[in-house]
């Protein structure tokens, strides 16, 4: 593995490309740990900071996962697989090194709105299991989630919602989520939401709707996230 310090391509990008080829090998896809950072940086003749830039990008894309005290390995594609990788909130925060704190959790049954009933192709009289969560970091909450689950699925509200959501659904029910379609909008926070997110009424928030489907394109979850604008940035990458 040789990088070219004279190239116009930054070293961290060269290292990233090299890692992409490395983790495509069957032994790493089968679960073998990557060499530790000291060995890998030495073999590439770059600093550990430069190497971490490359690894962080692959972790962010959901291709690699790091476990403290264990090492770095290729991510199992069961949950985040697809043409375009996407991550659950817990996974997003994990890639950024943010420890998630749960401020509030509510599980209840609720009738779906016409929009949600249309998404699930169910009656407005159906009972949907609904999960509301306020989450953030150690300093303050920065997002409120409201998740409606398809009433045709076996989810009943008694599940262990302290586990990562999609991991729990796969382990307990064999539901493997595959596709997430998203809508983004913005508005000003009302009094109640501002109080929950510890901001001022009238402060800007980002609204992120997720329409989640399983491997068979069956709708699984209708999710709305209300994010503090000062704590969340939505990044898009387009390649021509």
Image (cartoon, rainbow, N blue to C red):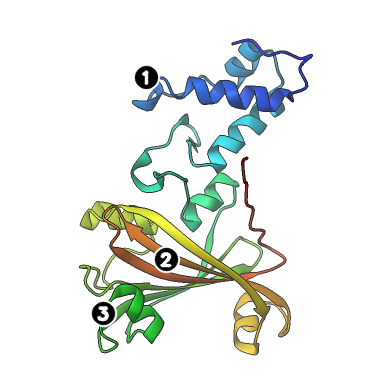
- How far apart, in angstroms, are the residues tagged by discs 1 and 3? 45 Å
Q: Residues within 10 Å of mark 3 (few under 14, many from 20)?
A: some
> Looking at the image, is mark 2 or mark 1 earlier in the sequence?
1
In the rendered view of the protein, which quadrant contains the C terminus?
Answer: top right
Residue 202 lies left or right of residue 89; in this view the side is right
In the rendered view of the protein, which quadrant contains the N terminus?
Answer: top right
Q: Which mark is residue 122?
A: 3
Q: Nearer the viewer, residue 48 or 215?
A: 215
Q: Secondary structure at mark 1?
A: helix
Residue 176: give x, y in percent of width and height: 29, 52
Look at the numbered discs 1 and 3 and tell me whether their residues touch, using CB distance below 8 Å.
no
Residue 65: give x, y in percent of width and height: 48, 37
Q: Residue at x 67, y 14 (%)?
A: 3
Q: Which residue is mark 2?
A: 211
Residue 225 lies left or right of residue 200; in this view the side is left
Q: Residue at x 72, y 21 (%)?
A: 47
Visible residue check, residue 235? yes
Q: In the figure, 79 relative to 224: above or below?
A: above
């Amino acid at each position: 593995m040789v990088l070219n310090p004279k190239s116009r391509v930054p070293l961290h990008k060269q290292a990233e490309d090299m890692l992409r080829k490395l983790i495509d090998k069957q032994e790493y896809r089968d679960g073998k740990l990557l060499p530790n950072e000291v060995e890998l940086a030495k073999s590439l003749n770059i600093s550990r900071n430069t190497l971490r830039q490359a690894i962080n990008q692959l972790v962010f894309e959901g291709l690699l996962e790091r476990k403290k005290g264990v090492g770095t390995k290729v991510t199992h594609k069961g949950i985040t697989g697809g043409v375009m990788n996407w991550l659950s909130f817990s996974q997003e925060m994990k890639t950024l090194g943010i420890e998630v704190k749960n401020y509030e959790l509510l599980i209840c049954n609720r009738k779906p709105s016409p929009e949600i009933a249309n998404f699930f192709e169910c009656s407005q009289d159906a009972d949907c299991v609904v999960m509301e969560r306020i989450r953030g970091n150690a300093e303050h909450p920065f997002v409120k989630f409201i998740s409606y689950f398809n009433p045709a699925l076996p989810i009943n509200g008694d599940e262990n919602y302290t586990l990562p959501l999609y991991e729990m659904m796969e382990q307990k029910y064999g539901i493997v989520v595959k596709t997430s379609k998203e809508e983004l909008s913005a508005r000003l926070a009302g009094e109640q939401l501002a109080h929950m997110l510890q901001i001022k009424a009238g402060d800007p928030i980002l609204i992120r709707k997720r329409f989640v489907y399983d491997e068979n394109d069956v709708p699984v979850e209708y999710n709305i996230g209300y994010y503090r604008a000062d704590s969340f940035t939505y990044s898009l990458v387009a390649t021509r």
